[in-house]
Image (cartoon, rainbow, N blue to C red):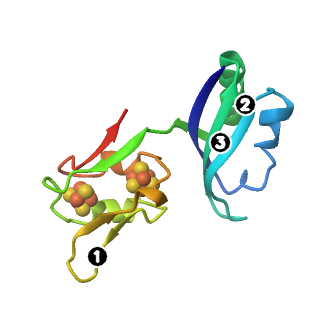
Amino acid sequence: MASEKLILSFPKNVVTKPIVYHVVKDFDLEFNILRAEITPNLEGRMLLEIRGKKDKIEECKNFFKKEGVQVREATQEIILDKELCVNCGVCVSLCFSNALSMNKDSFEIEFDKNKCVLCGICLNGCPVNALKSKI
Ligand code: SF4
Ligand code: SF4
């Protein structure tokens, strides 16, 4: 049995469709929603773990894409290198789940692993590569 963690990004026009329901019904996969931010009429994101036959997982990913859902494989873990970080704050504006924030007293960046949905968006935004993905 294979398993993958996926970041699904739902555009406004797709966000209310019962797309995840098809994971079980059409592809015979097990799923676990690890985190989700879904708001009607707004874009939504979900960290979804799916388990089942490899070919069915691929079919399911293609189905998501056909339905207009952006699919990316989640990174394993995000690491903030405090030695490299210059506290510029760029990553704070990129992180939709508020895992990265600026401490209002020290003006230093703080990273809350529990809020991170492993979307990887911050990785390309850091000008000094202080954010890394551990595979
Ligand atoms: S973008 Fe990079 S350097 Fe800037 S605050 Fe975030 S981790 Fe630090
Ligand atoms: S990967 Fe980066 S941008 Fe995405 S939730 Fe985690 S800290 Fe925020």
Q: 110 above or below 10?
A: below
Mark 1, ligand 1, within 8 Å: the answer is no
CA gap between label 2 and label 3 equals: 9 Å
Residue at far top of view: 55
Marks 1,2: beta carbons within 8 A: no
Q: Amino acid at mark 1?
A: Asn
Tag 1, which secondary structure? loop
- Residue 88, horizontal then vertical, whole percent: 21, 65
Tag 3, which secondary structure? loop
- Residue 32, horizontal then vertical, whole percent: 68, 43
Q: Residues within 10 Å of mark 2 (few under 14, many from 20)?
A: some
- Between 81 and 129, the one lying in front of the other is 81
Question: Considering only order in the chain, which callout, 3 or 2, is on the residue closer to the N terminus?
Answer: 2
Query: Which residue is at 72% across, 21% downward?
Result: 56
Q: Give the residue pinned by disc 1.
A: 103
Q: Give the residue pinned by disc 3.
A: 69
Q: Residues within 10 Å of mark 3 (few under 14, many from 20)?
A: many
